[in-house]
Image (tube, helix red, strand yellow):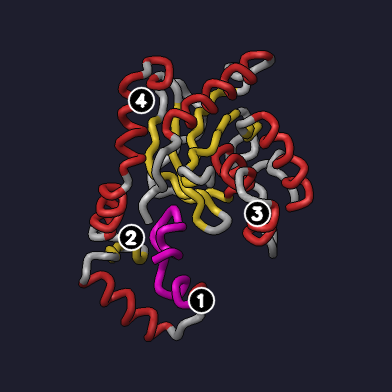
Amino acid sequence: MDLLAGSPRPLGLSEIARAAGLAKSSAHGICETLSALGLLRSEATGYAIGPHALRWSAAYLGRTSLVSEFEALLASDDALRSATTTLSVLSGRDVVYLACHNSDRPLGFTFRAGERLPAPFTATGKAMLSALSETERQALLAGDWPAPLTPASVPDAARFETQAARWQTLGYAIDDGEVREGMVCLGAAVRDTQGRPVAGLATSFTSAEAAGDKRAALGRAVAALAHRLSAHRPLPD
């Protein structure tokens, strides 16, 4: 399921078997069972995620009051509604987007709920990782570094530690072309009652829109918005 969820196209049986380290007959049996349950969909070119997976997504989002609070925040703020704004959570070394509002203004990138991206390259990931203790952060980022998405993507854990100190001081984090060249995202951590990061809020702009002094003003604004979402209770498991 994770393999197919991370693929932009259906995968053939041979690809699935090879990636999962399974015999082709075993992969076929599993895929057919999941298809019968509606969790996968059989297409001409292979298997893709099926519609039943949406029930799990909806059940999770239904328990997550933070999503409804995010949507209420969007509805009450004209400036926020005109920008590309996202809410995400950490999942290991990735961020997973819970809710996305894509602006009409072209960014060259569209965020989607359920999408995963390497946390060290994203504004929300940087903000949430920087809000963890150094020990927790280094444990999460140990091992092979994610493949860069652009030439600007932070190259290693040591460089990320340098960045983390800056984000802690600023109160927000910056993805300056690390996910998409020409796109700047500013993100801040949403915290629970103990001050731990439970989510991240970000707004995204073109490099021209977030140039010069305007970038700092936008960063402070997103930090203030994240503070409004920050809690007085932890995010449900």
- Whole-percent x and y of residue 134? 70, 52
- The residue wearing badge 1 is 18
175 sits left or right of 191 in the view: right
Q: Tell me which numbered mark, 3 or 2, is placed earlier along the sequence.
A: 2
* Quarter of the C terminus within the rendering: bottom left
Asked where in the image residue 2 lies, by quadrant, the reply is bottom left
Which class describes the residues within 10 Å of circle 4: few (<14), some (14-19), or many (20+)?
Answer: some
**Magenta stretch: includes residue 74:** no
Describe the element under mark 2 as helix, strand or loop: strand
Name the kind of residue labelled 3 in the image. Answer: Arg
- Whole-percent x and y of residue 92? 54, 58
Taking the image as drawn, is residue 181 in sight? Answer: no
Q: Tell me which numbered mark, 3 or 1, is placed earlier along the sequence.
A: 1
Name the kind of residue labelled 1 in the image. Answer: Arg
CA–CA distance in space, label 1 to label 2? 18 Å
Query: Which numbered tag is attached to residue 74?
Result: 4
Q: Residue at x 74, y 48 (%)?
A: 155
Q: Which residue is drawn at 39% across and 79% down?
A: 27
Name the kind of residue labelled 2 in the image. Answer: Ile
Q: Magenta segment range?
A: 1-18
Asked where in the image residue 5 lies, by quadrant, the reply is bottom left
Query: Which numbered tag is attached to residue 137?
Result: 3
- Observer-side mark, 1 or 2, equals 2
CA–CA distance in space, label 3 to label 1? 32 Å
Instruction: Classify 2 as above or below 164.
Output: below
* Quarter of the N terminus within the rendering: bottom left
Which class describes the residues within 10 Å of circle 2: few (<14), some (14-19), or many (20+)?
Answer: many
CA–CA distance in space, label 1 to label 4? 44 Å
Name the kind of residue labelled 4 in the image. Answer: Leu
- The residue wearing badge 2 is 49
Q: Which residue is drawn at 54% across and 24% down?
A: 205
Q: Tell me which numbered mark, 4 or 3, is placed earlier along the sequence.
A: 4
